[in-house]
Amino acid sequence: MPDFLTIDGNLRAAMRFFGEASGAGEVRELDGSIAIFSGLDYGVFNIALLTSPARDGQLQGRLQDAARFFRERTLRWSFWLCDDLLDPASARHGRQTFLNFGMRAISHPPGMLAEALAPPVRQLPEIECRPVCDAPSRAAFAELTSIAFDIPYAIARAVYTREEAWRGDYRGFVGVAQGRVVATVAMVAAAEAVGVYSLATVPAFRRRGYGEALLRAAAAQMTARTGLRRLALQSTEAGYSLYRRLGFRDVTTFTVYLTK
């Protein structure tokens, strides 16, 4: 499997979480794409993605299918596009194709892959890695995710605090230090890799190694459970230098489109 398909496949598996977490969502397999409705009026959590390469003008048809699905449910949705899934002609006209559907590009996160984590370059602080498995850990995950990623708190609570949300492949972890939750991360084993999502640290504890310490501890638990050592992610600008230091390399680029 090409590396970019590993990253894209893991992302699709992870995004299904948002169609199942609130109890009011839906996941629909379309022709060459997947549409994930969170049940909430929040475009970033209502997501469409390609499930196979789009060639010879197929992108427009797949966008039409996704737009039809979301039109019946919400006006606010997004499309995570792995740029390597487009042929050259579709890539040249991709931006205009999305504009024609009233969608604008809001970010271009690189898709990154590591065969294994590189050794630490500094001594990391002690952190206790706990699974998200009860009401306090779910509440802590929701609160910190809301703060770190600028998600409305009510939306974060609706997605992350239901017990049923965490019964699938999406595994959450909280890092505890000095008697409080200081970091979060989620991981998904799919497409022959462990995907890393929602890595965040409490503002007062940033730049001290707590996020890296939790990432390493959670990855070790996932490797022990699944046997998978490869790690995949889509990087934010703030996290890029950390991920490069940890041994991740750029493989592909995603373009995230959002309805205007």
Image: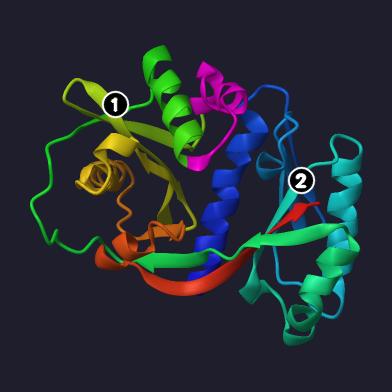
Residue neighbourhood size for the residue with mark 2, other residues' Cα within 10 Å, grouped as few (<14), some (14–19), many (≥20): many
**In the drawing, does residue 65 fall left or right of residue 250?**
right
Give the mark nearer the N terminus: 1 vs 2. 2
Q: Residue at x 88, y 54 (%)?
A: 65
**In the drawing, does residue 71 fall left or right of residue 181?**
right
Q: Residue at x 80, y 58 (%)?
A: 103
**Camera-side residue of 209 and 15:** 209
Specify start and end residues of the magenta stretch as a single range: 149-167
Q: Residue flagged by tag 1: what amino acid is it?
A: Val
Q: Which residue is mark 2?
A: 77
Q: In x, y percent, where is residue 179? A: 19, 20
Looking at the image, which residue sits at the far left? 123
Q: Is residue 201 visible?
A: yes
Q: Which residue is mark 1?
A: 181
**Camera-side residue of 175 and 54:** 175
Spatial CA span between label 1 and label 2: 31 Å
Helix, strand or loop for the magenta stretch, by majority:
helix
Label total for image: 2
Q: In x, y percent, where is residue 41? A: 75, 32
Residue 163 among those drawn in magenta? yes
Q: Residue flagged by tag 2: what amino acid is it?
A: Trp
**In the drawing, does residue 143 fall left or right of residue 158?**
left
Measured along the vertical axis of the image, is residue 85 above or below residue 184? below
**Image quadrant assignment for residue 76:** top right
